[in-house]
Image (cartoon, rainbow, N blue to C red):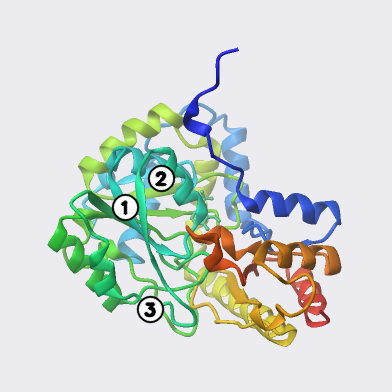
């Protein structure tokens, strides 16, 4: 038979799924995959049920139902301070992943170069590979994950088209400061570059830090596609709803692609989600308080177990180093350490090697997700403490 498309040559399933299968096989506690398993807010669930009962079941406009777009516009203006002009600057997407796919195809041609910051979210990297985009990465190091802007500038070539930025970051939790974003924007203006920003953890910033959107800075909006999602904010990773914000001509091109790839995001779920915004600011305060408590629990347990723990500034992962444990059997490298924890104590994590272009850079790191129900997280922490 003739060969299948070469597009999938070299494409492998994310390590995250392999870990999930192994943890499930021992009925363990999965701190690997970032699937917050807390309940979706009742207002959203009731809204979606009502929409189903009212047969709101047909294709929606490709860029989302107007009532949801209205809510998103209010949020983008009020929380993110992004200077959107109107609905043409917003598109509802099939999760932020759907937004990233269309952003990459709308902005980048095969052979273009982008610059990422390591450690990075692997889905971004794999999709860019699929599009034939060349990636360069600036490594950031714990505990401060500081950006060396002089080194960053040396990575820019005439083929460079965009930065890919995730703030707050998965896996290391770095929250980009205003000063850092300003410096990045200076480079973007100087070298005529775009940015695609992934801000799905925007509500999870700790120790008084505030999330800042690159697109909110003076001159940032014109050059930035901002992606966000409801997956993490409302505990609904499986609903597949997110959105993109950006200049009208870019969003229009992304819309053409989104229509082609997905037609639209799920209809009744969009109506349900529109209701979730009614819960007001108290919802986000509670969410942050809950995650902050869990962050403390997780970090202290890992420290007690002997890990090096740079406490995350944002998001809901701890990217911890196990070099101090590497003399023990089963802790030679990240994959081995990950499997050792599953086999010995039934706790799943993700090998740090999955977050670097050179896996050796993540050899002594594991990512633990603390977006878990309290009793499960507590049990996982107890097991780690007794390691
Ligand atoms: C940085 C980052 N971006 C995007 C996603 C996926 O988001 P969505 O469910 O909105 O596609 C994740 C999920 O873990 C993530 O960590």
Assign the N terminus to one quadrant of the image: top right
Assign the C terminus to one quadrant of the image: bottom right
Tell me the CA gap for discs 1 and 2: 9 Å
- Secondary structure category for the residue under label 3: loop
Q: Which residue is mark 2?
A: 128
Residue 129: horizontal and vertical position, in percent?
43, 43
Q: Residues within 10 Å of mark 3 (few under 14, many from 20)?
A: few
Instruction: Kindly check if marks 1 and 2 are in contact, taking CB atoms under 8 A apart as contact.
Output: yes
Q: Residue at x 50, y 49 (%)?
A: 123
- Secondary structure category for the residue under label 2: helix
Q: Residue at x 64, y 79 (%)?
A: 323
Q: Which residue is mark 1?
A: 114
Is residue 192 shown to the viewer in this render?
yes
Q: Residue at x 72, y 68 (%)?
A: 337
Q: Residues within 10 Å of mark 1 (few under 14, many from 20)?
A: many
Tell me the CA gap for discs 2 and 3: 24 Å
As drawn, 48 above or below 119 = above
Instruction: Kindly check if marks 1 and 3 are in contact, taking CB atoms under 8 A apart as contact.
Output: no
Is residue 61 shown to the viewer in this render?
no
- Secondary structure category for the residue under label 1: strand
The answer to whether residue 235 is left or right of residue 346 is left
Q: Which residue is mark 3?
A: 146
């Amino acid at each position: 038979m003739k060969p299948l498309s070469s597009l999938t040559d070299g494409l492998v399933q994310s390590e995250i799924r392999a870990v999930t299968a192994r943890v499930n096989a021992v009925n363990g506690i999965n701190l690997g995959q970032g699937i917050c398993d807390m309940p979706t807010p009742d207002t959203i669930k009731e809204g979606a049920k009502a929409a189903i009962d009212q047969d709101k079941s047909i294709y929606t406009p490709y860029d989302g139902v107007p009532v949801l777009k209205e809510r998103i516009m209010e949020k983008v203006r009020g929380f993110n301070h992004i200077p959107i002009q109107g609905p043409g600057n917003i598109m509802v997407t099939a999760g932020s992943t759907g937004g990233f796919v269309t952003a990459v195809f709308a902005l980048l041609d095969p052979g273009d170069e982008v610059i990422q910051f390591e450690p990075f979210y692997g889905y971004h990297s794999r999709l860019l590979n699929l599009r034939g985009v060349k990636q360069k990465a600036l490594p950031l190091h714990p505990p401060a994950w500081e950006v060396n802007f002089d080194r960053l500038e040396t990575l820019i070539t005439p083929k460079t088209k965009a930065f890919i930025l995730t703030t707050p970051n998965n896996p290391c939790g770095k929250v980009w400061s205003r000063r850092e974003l300003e410096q990045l924007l200076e480079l973007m203006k100087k070298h005529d570059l775009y940015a695609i920003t992934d801000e799905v953890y925007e509500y999870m910033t700790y120790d008084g830090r505030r999330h800042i959107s690159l697109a909110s800075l003076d001159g940032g909006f014109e050059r930035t596609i901002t992606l966000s999602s409801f997956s993490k904010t409302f505990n609904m990773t499986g609903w597949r709803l997110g959105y993109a914000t950006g200049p009208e001509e870019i969003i229009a091109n992304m819309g053409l692609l989104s229509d082609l790839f997905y037609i639209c995001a799920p209809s009744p779920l969009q109506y349900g989600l529109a209701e979730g915004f009614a819960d007001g600011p108290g919802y986000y305060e509670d969410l942050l308080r809950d995650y902050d408590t869990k962050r403390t629990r997780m970090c202290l347990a890992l420290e007690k177990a002997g890990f090096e723990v740079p406490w995350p500034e944002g998001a809901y992962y701890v990217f911890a180093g196990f070099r101090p444990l590497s003399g023990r059997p089963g802790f030679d490298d990240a994959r081995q350490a990950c499997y050792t924890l599953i086999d010995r104590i039934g706790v799943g994590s993700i090998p740090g090697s999955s977050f670097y272009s050179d896996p050796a850079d993540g050899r002594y790191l594991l990512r633990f997700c603390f977006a878990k129900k309290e009793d499960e997280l507590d049990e996982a922490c107890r097991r780690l403490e007794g390691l």
